[in-house]
Each structure stands twice: as structure tokens, then as C-alpha cells.
Image: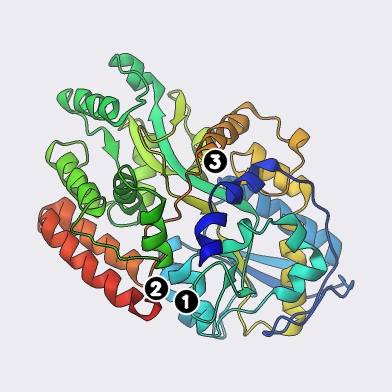
Amino acid sequence: MRYRKHATTAALAAVALTLAACSSGGGSSQTPTGGATASGDNDYAGETLTVLVYENDESAMGKAWREAAKIFEEETGATVDYQITSFEDLSDTASQLFVSSDAPDLSEYNKGNGTAGALSTLGVLQNLDGFFESYGWDDKLADSLQTTTKYDENGVMGDGAHYGVPNYGEFVFLYYNADLLAEHGVEVPETLEDFEAALQTFADAGMTPLVTSAQEYPAGQLWYQLVLNDADRSFVDAYQLYDGEVDFAAPPAADGTAKLAEWVEKGYVSRSATGMTAEDAGLAFINGEAPFFYSGSWWYGRFLNDITDFELGIADFPGSTLVPGSSGNLWVVPTVTDELHTQMAAYFIDITMRPEIQAILGNAGGLPVAADPADITDENAQALIELFNEVLDRDGLAFYPDWPTATFYDDLNAGLQGLINGSLTPEQTAEQLQADYDAGTEQFR
């Protein structure tokens, strides 16, 4: 656990923005034991590779992966059946889908103990060790980035075999409507006190200042950020890596829960967030209905593309050292994928690591892990990278709130829905989350 505690923070994302050059590889074969390597045969004419993702085509990743699919088809003679689902649907069905006759050959999937880690222990995902060696992904992804690709026999990240491959990084920060801030005489907040004063200004003007979704992940990330505002690395190690006890009724967890409840009472966050999806919240921000939206870098490319009526701004969450963030989601290969299509899946993954694909991702607002720095020329992309580097400089990445258990995503959403709609007090929310967290992490302690 010592490695996971200290090697998974600043160095993890530093690799994403060092942007070391990479090269493409040939086709490969793979078995669930991880013994296969690249074969050099990329003639898959007449075959179809089914790829399942939950990134929409307007996102940086979506743009890059669509281009990767075109290159794959040109180089192999195969067809890519590129399918888009929702994060929620895949989270709910992956353990069944990945062992069914409808399983994709290759899928995007969430990283972390409760997701990729949990599926690895069920034998649902292929061990990709052989591909890491033969394609050189070990060299393209530093050890710190590989924290979320490796899972031990208990499904705990950082050690064991490789079960996935990330090709981008991510973190969570504050998006703001610069025109609304200027209209109301509000400066970009630099401290939590500044931020709360800004939120009050907009609430006084009859506007809900911070749009979020309690039906999906944004409210959970907001809660975690409010917890992290008063946390240190030892709390993150205890919460994420089971290295110590976590008390939801004591600081910093209790303080974050109380602060979110306070923001709801003051009108900074609407009770109607319980009926909003992440997409609803993002669209509300795009449409200029709120001055602030707290969410991840995966929205950045879409916002740059879709926001035309106001100036978009991005900022670090005011006053916090730690923020949610990690390597990006993983490419995973279900164990039911046959040998030929596993070869094809690995070839597709490697295309997404090529400099030209990484450049598309970076210039569209994503955080590439293997691009040539000279290829990142977009001013907005450079602004995102600069903000990310500020987080790295202070060792600020703290993973995500739902990672500790296989069910904690749903558990956290349920608890926060009760908190936000007023059916649960902060104390009751803490009690419920404690029970869910303890039940899910008992096997690791």
C-alpha cells in the first residue's frame, strides 16, 4: 500500500502533461492470463470490432476516438461498430453485459477499486500484461499512471495485473460564466470565503448560482471537494486505500456534508438537483442559467464547442489543495472477446495512443498522456494544461468519491439526494454513508 499512497498523485498526472512522444504498434493476441503479445498481423478485412463508449462525439475523447476508428478501418480493412451508451447504463450493467453474447469487443470503463477493480476479481476483464509489454505501453505510461490500470487479487488498485489502458488524464475544477460574473461585479474567487460571497451575490439576485446533478455524479464530486477542503493526504489514503479509519461523523467528512447542506439552505444549490442528470446540469450551464458549474475536464471540449453566448472561464476550486482527479477512464477487453477480436481491440487501443490522435484529444480540450508537446497549439488547451499543472505542483489529485466500494456510487448518490431534498439531516446522511462505506470496505481492512 505504500506505493499506492505516494506514487499516485503528482507524478500520475505529470505524465499526462509531460506529453512524451509515443509510437504505434502492430496487431496482437491475448488470453485472460496476460500471456499474449503483439503478432504483427493487422489484416482483419471483413471483420467487425465492436467498441462501446460513453463519451459523446462532442467531447475531446469522442473526437479523438472517432478518428482512431477511421484509421483502424483504413489500416485493417475491418469495420468499427462504434456504440455510445451512458455512464449510468454501463455502470449498472457492465458485470452482466461483459459476460453476455451482447458484450462489446472493447469498452471504455470507469477506473477504481469499485469498478474496474471489482470486475477484475470476477474474471470479467482480460489481463492485458502481454500487450503492455509488446506494445510498449509500460514505457508510454509511467508507473504512477498505471496505478489505475493494475488491480490485485482483491481488486485494489496499484498492484497486480493490468486490466485496462488509459489514454488521457482528468480532474475536476470550477467552470464559470465570465459574462455573468462581470455583470454582477464578481471577481473570480480565490478562497472559499470569496466563493461563498460570490454565491450569495447571485442568490440575492434570484439566481441559483451553482448548478449540479444529484441524480448522477456531479453532486458527489462537489460533496467530496467540500470534504477535501479540510482534508490532507492521510484522509485520502484512509478513504481510498483503506490505510486507516474513516469517520463520516467527524471532520473532514462531516464538515463537507454540513457545508453542502448549508449551501442548499442558502439557495446556492437547488433542491431540484435531485431530479437532474449530469447532462441536465451541463446543458443548464451551457444555456447560461447559472454562473458556476463544478465538474470534470471531460466537459471542457464540449463547452468550448457549444457555448457561444458567453465567455467560458475555468478556475481551481477556491481554497483547496486537494481535488478529485486521476488518470482517465480505461479501455478494457471482456474475457468473452475471442482471440481474433482481442487482437483487434489491442490494435485499436494502440492507435488511440499515437501522437496524431493524442494531439486531436489535447487540442479539443482533453488531457493527453502521450502527445508531442509541439502538437498542442490551441490556446484553450494550453489553459487547461496550465490549470492542471497547478494541481500537480501541490500534489493535489485525490481520486474520486465513489471508488472505495463497488456500490458506493449509488450509495453516495442516494445519501446526497436525501441531504439535498431535505429528507435526511447531515447527521443521518453521515450515518447512512458510514454504514454503506463500512460494509463495502470490510473485506479490505
- Left of 175 or right of it: where is 158? right
Q: Position of residue 80 (x, y in %)?
A: 70, 66
Residue bearing the label numbered 1: 118
Q: Nearer the viewer, mark 3 or mark 1?
A: 3
Q: Quadrant of residue 402?
A: bottom left
- Left of 64 or right of it: where is 235? left
Q: Mark 2 or mark 1: which comes first in sequence?
A: 1
**Residue type for callout 1:** Ala
Contact flag, marks 2 and 3 (Cβ < 8 Å): no
How far, Cα to Cα, is label 3 from label 1? 28 Å
Pointer 1: residues within 10 angstroms few (<14), some, or many (20+)? many
Contact flag, marks 2 and 1 (Cβ < 8 Å): yes
How far, Cα to Cα, is label 2 from label 3? 28 Å
Q: Would you say residue 83 is visible in this rendering?
A: no
Q: Would you say residue 254 is visible in this rendering?
A: yes
Q: Which mark is residue 406?
A: 2
6, above or below 286, in the image: below
